[in-house]
Amino acid sequence: MKTIHALLEDVRKKLVETGTRNRLIHVNRRTVRGNLLNIINERSDDIFHIIRVSGKKMRFAGKGEEEDSDAGGVVLTEIQDIEFDEGRYTDSVLETPLTPDALQKRLLKLFKDSKTAEEEQGINILYLAMGFLQWYEDKNSTVLRESPLVLLPVALVRNDRTSTYDIICRDDDIVTNLPLQERLKLDFGISLPEIDDSSEWIPGDYFDRVRETISERGRWNVDPDGMQLGFFSFAKLMMLRDLDPENWNEQSLLDNKLISGLLADGFSPEPSIFKDGDNLDDKLSPEKILHVVDADSSQTKVIEEVRSGRNLVVQGPPGTGKSQTITNILAAAVHDNKKVLFVAEKMAALEVVYNRMCKVGLKDLCLELHSRSANKKTFLQGLAETISNSKGVKSPNLDTEELVKARDELNKVSNLLHKPLPKRDYAPYSVLTELVSYVSKNTRAPRFDATHLESITSDQESEIFEALQNYLDIVSEFGFGSDNPFRGTTNLDLQPTDLQRLLDDLKGATDSLSSWTSFQSKLERAISPESLLTLSSADSCRSIFEYLQRAPVNSNQFISFVYANKGIARFEDAVCHAQSWVNFKKEISETVTENVWKTDLEHLRSPIVKGMGSFLSRIFGKYRSASKELGTYLKSDLPKSPEDRLKLVDAIIEGKKKRDLFDEEVEFLKSKIGEEWRGERTPFTEIISVLKWLQGTSKEFAEFTSEKLKGLIGQETIRTFSAQDFESRKSSLLESFQRVNQRLGLSDLSEESVKDLSLQDLGTRIKAMMQNPDTYSLWTRTAFTSNRLIELQCGPLLEMIREEKVSLSSAKTELGYAIA
């Protein structure tokens, strides 16, 4: 019991929201927006007497100035008349700081929101707050908090005469602001007085008691006549009190096994009173079944499980009979002398069951504890009516013997002829009847394999036949849609406005395609007299143009012999050796004489190397004679250091090797280069650049001859070609296709799919769409019906119909015979 008590106490603490986000703790009375309405120039005691004690209606008056459009909202400044009439405190008008128009808008919103809350939750959350406690969270705080002290339950009612809204007081209890009471107790040790709501009670006395309670708080104050109409939820307060064991007689809440199972101990598994395959007629006799509304077998099982005392959860989508089941459970429970508390999150769920109980004459069994009409007066009236109507009611004598005999006889016949096959919803009789019908008509055996449909239900079979009939009707009238320009469209729900926008997109695609094909034709004719007009051929054309633009200067001068020798490895090596020798000779020609290339200088390396490592070797060795000999081949003075002299000797030796390689290839190069041969003056660098350029050609150049390339290089169309312009035009074209594709969902118009399509054929199809938009609806009807058949696993039959293996007239027979 301690565990349950602690759990309940923990839940109750969580239900008390004491933060300033709770409007029962703090209300921003200065806000210009929100679901609230400030009341001005009124006194709480007078208003309380008029609408609570006297039970009168009050109307609202807008006393605000004209709305300021620059302020972004309505004016909320209080109006202080120069000559204030005291009689305004006791009249039937509540004054507000809004303009009349703004007031009516605010009242309409409050009325709608309060009505919605009542309809959905069954509780009122609209209150007239009277008096506000003005307090600070600590001594240093500069933020003023304002909390309502008295909350009067009210309702807005429409005045049919003035088409405005009046306010009336509801016959509900006035309760203490419990969250504020808890906050003051926890933070400041202050006990907020209780509201007794007796006939003599008035707000002014309560405000005086609050002033006494907070008297030691210097800056705290009570605004007795501050009033505000707004939403304050006490739903958690009601739950808080319901969960207080002290509000229950004899501690029944703590001893309740259901509460213990839900919060602490859980529930032990209980075997069902019904086993799988049980016949309910064998388990339940008619005199024990208490159904006030229709119930099928599954619902009957639930009802009897509940009557046996089991705790269970029943789940099901809307329309599966849960409310009927609940109605029967309630009626059976009352018959078994039990009391039932029926709760639901939404008021609508309560009303459905209540209305069902009323329709079957069981209204007197129902007592509304939590609804729009559940106040003390109606509660007591309902209780009195039930007690009064229960007098003199006698239990009927029911003789079920004849009913049992008739039931058993009917069950016997049904079981013999119509018991469903295992895992089927049809009996052998229905299948045999259908097969006999086909055989008697000499129907040809079906070719459609319906094995995968062997476990379908009768409803599913009907659904398949309906889908097939819809498809046959469409195809019979309009064909299969293979010639429809919208064929392949997957967006099948375009509205008239969408189709109008589609026409604009099709027009844009047509214009873009026309511009592009003209542009592409010009490019392709520059290369070949034949225009393929596909995006793939356009990309190939672009590659060719970009490559031709990269042709080296003077390419035409050398392209003939280079093109003829581009695949010969020796030719490339020979040209490279020649270029290396010519470049080297040019670099060193100002340093050495020409006759140096006729002499071998290898013997000079060793003395110079020795001279690098020893000073004596440079004086007494061969270093000086070697240096002297080296100097005879130079056009300028010898280098000073041995290292530099060695570098020069090595360079000359290396250069001689380059010259020897060149000399070896002279006759070969002369034969290959022909008229362009100039010996060492031949422009080997330009020849190599042309060779490298030709070696980089792609497959698009496979059929190009050297003369063809010579004709293309420098051509005006190629010379002025811009890859950026090409991509811009292509992107514009693809974007126009994409816009159409987004409307229609055509995979044919994706960038990947369209690249190999004939742009001329595509243009013809798009024009057909634009000129015949009505064919869209024909395609959608065909697509909807064919897609439905595929969803119902009849795709193979659909293909047989399209391939004319099954005629339209025999398709339904083919399907029915195959399924049977």
Image (cartoon, helix red, strand yellow):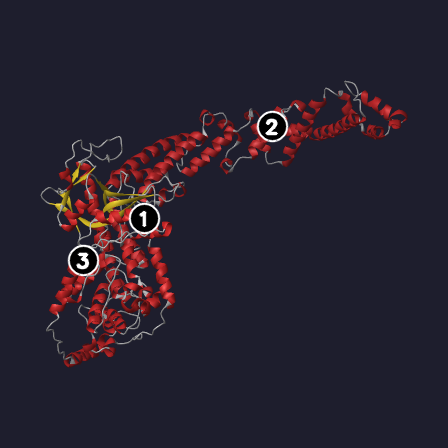
Q: Amino acid at mark 1?
A: Asn
The quarter in which the N terminus is drawn is bottom left
Relative depth, front residue between 114 and 640: 114
Disc with the residue nearer the chain's start (3 vs 1)? 1
Whether tag 3 and tag 2 are in contact, CB under 8 A, the answer is no
**SS assignment at label 1:** loop
Q: Nearer the viewer, residue 473 or 9?
A: 9
> Would you name the residue on which mark 1 appears?
22
* Amino acid type of the residue that numbered disc 3 sits on in the rendered structure: Asn
Residue 453: quarter of image: bottom left
Q: Nearer the viewer, residue 3 or 720?
A: 3
Q: Horizontal and vertical percent for residue 736?
A: 34, 36
Three-letter amino acid code of the residue under disc 2: Ile
CA gap, disc 3 and disc 2: 107 Å
Which element carries disc 2, helix, strand or loop?
helix
Which residue of the protein is positioned furthest toward the right in this rendering?
A: 620
Query: Mark 3 or mark 2: which is in front?
Result: 3
Q: Residue at x 32, y 36 (%)?
A: 509
